[in-house]
Image (spheres, rainbow, N blue to C red):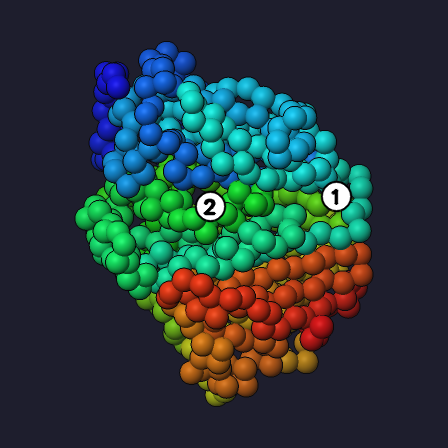
Amino acid sequence: MPRPAERPSPDRLLREAAARLDRRRFLTVTSAAATLAFTVNLPSAHADTPEFAPRLITDDPFTLGVASGDPLPDAVVLWTRLAPRPLEPGGGLPPAGSVRVGWEIARDERFRRVERRGSVRAHAEFNYAVHVDVDGLDAARGYFYRFTVGAWASPVGRTRTAPARTRRPERTRFAVVSCQAYEDGYFTAYRHLADEDLDAVFHVGDYVYEYAIDAAGGDRKYTDRVLPAALDHETVTLEDYRLRYSLYKNDPDLQAAHSAHPWYVTWDDHEVENNYAAGIPEKNQDPAPFVARRAAAYRAYWENQPLRLPQPRGTDLTLYRRVHCGQLAQFDILDTRQYRDDQANGDGWQYPTPESQDPRRTLMGATQERWFAEGLRRSRATWNVVPQQVVFSRRKNTTAERSKLSMDAWDGYPAARERFLKAVDEAGTKNLLLLTGDVHVAYAMDVKRDFDDPGSRTVGVEIVGTSVSSDGDGEEKPSNWATLTAANPHMKFYDGRRGYTTLTLDRHRARADYRTVSHITRPGGTVSTAASFVTEAGNPGLHPA
């Protein structure tokens, strides 16, 4: 295959750009990393990139599968990434240039009724990722899609558009997933998720993890393959993050879930580094190298997810967004990682202090807070659903009156939580439903207006979904089960096994089904429903179904 002239590597460009950033300015402009990642070499800027012939690709380039995401009433994003040799740097394709990729979307699986078709160029600059924003589609309709390059055809994916904004559907059913450390076990939950009847999947963070993965795939204990040594260190560079996504995307269970349903995604911390806060790394190291690392991680995230082209505003990459299921539900997808203040009191579980209780502290950033409050005021939906990352409700870890709290969760940002709840009050929101991940366990919790008063009114509910694989098989009742359920009377359910949660919304109630997998450290785990809860429209509070 011919090798077009090479450009400077993206990692080198990111490091050089980071070095030019004024340190003081970086510390005040929290999205400087996004500036680096998304103002350098966007695909649209490469109309003159040499194009090589698709016939020169001699091995299957669709090893990472297909995906769709961010469905609207008339549009959906289709995704794939070309990688004939996915676990090699560059994926087995030239380090520069582009290749043309065909796509089509149809009403039937055999593509006899093709609705739209076209072609786009996949660029080496973005690791041969393909994002097609297909518009002109019918609302609330299922479609099938596929890609082609040369003689190769991708697997067929299924997707679905959202209902029209003026309609009020009878119901919608979706899933919430999070936290899928590859090295902790198999993605068995996704194999079962692919078989569910869903309108969409919401991934609320920790899609990849940054930690080293050994040749046997950690707790997967492979005997039929040897993973490359390039995975056996923590991710830092753009090449590191790209290889990590290749490993995850090559998993057949994850591919099955992506090809079965459209996804809405948002990130948490492990897509970059554990518990980072805006531009501050986990252990308060020099932030100058971290800006390039975060930029690389953000860029790799976009390359590997079914997201629309980024639309930077100044220095801000906006991942938070609002979508609708007609007038039945409004979804405000939050980003509680990119704009937050640093964790108080050195992070971890700590007693509240004046530092953590500082009224100026923010988890969402001022701009996102205003956007969220305005969205609630304008909402006409029956349900206001908030997919977000970290636990919102109070979690005491002792029955004593004074208890340590998680400084990384909303408990570490009580003033920000109060502003959130004030926005709910002022908007008159009656049916608030938070969807959360992060903690690798499942909770069902009532959201109290004042968590210091157990008798305080309930203003909404929080569904915390467990992890797909992080922390291994887990157990039904972790060692702190009795303490946490006694210390937090608003906690109605707690389960420590792996799985996912499905939610069904209609005009009268919302139902959450907690789906757990028997084991994930070896293949073949079965799925069952551990518990089901409902909350009635206009009368918030969780009750067993």
Q: Quadrant of the N terminus?
A: top left
Q: Which mark is residue 168?
A: none
In the image shown, does 106 or 265 lie closer to the viewer?
A: 106
Q: Quadrant of the C terminus?
A: bottom right
Q: Residue at x 62, y 60 (%)?
A: 502
Q: Which residue corresponds to mark 1? A: 326
Task: Name the spot of residue 83 as percent of width and height, x first.
Answer: 35, 33
Above-or-below relation of 147 to 49: below
Task: Name the spot of residue 481 as percent of width and height, x first.
Answer: 49, 82
Q: Is residue 75 left or right of residue 471?
A: right
Q: Residue at x 48, y 70 (%)?
A: 518
Circle 1 SS class = loop
Above-or-below relation of 490 to 425: below
Residue 300: tell me if it is visible. Answer: yes
Q: Residue at x 53, y 25 (%)?
A: 103
Count up the numbered dots: 2
Instruction: Mark 1 vs mark 2: give the one in front.
Output: 2
Above-or-below relation of 8 to 413: above
Residue 370: tell me if it is visible. Answer: no
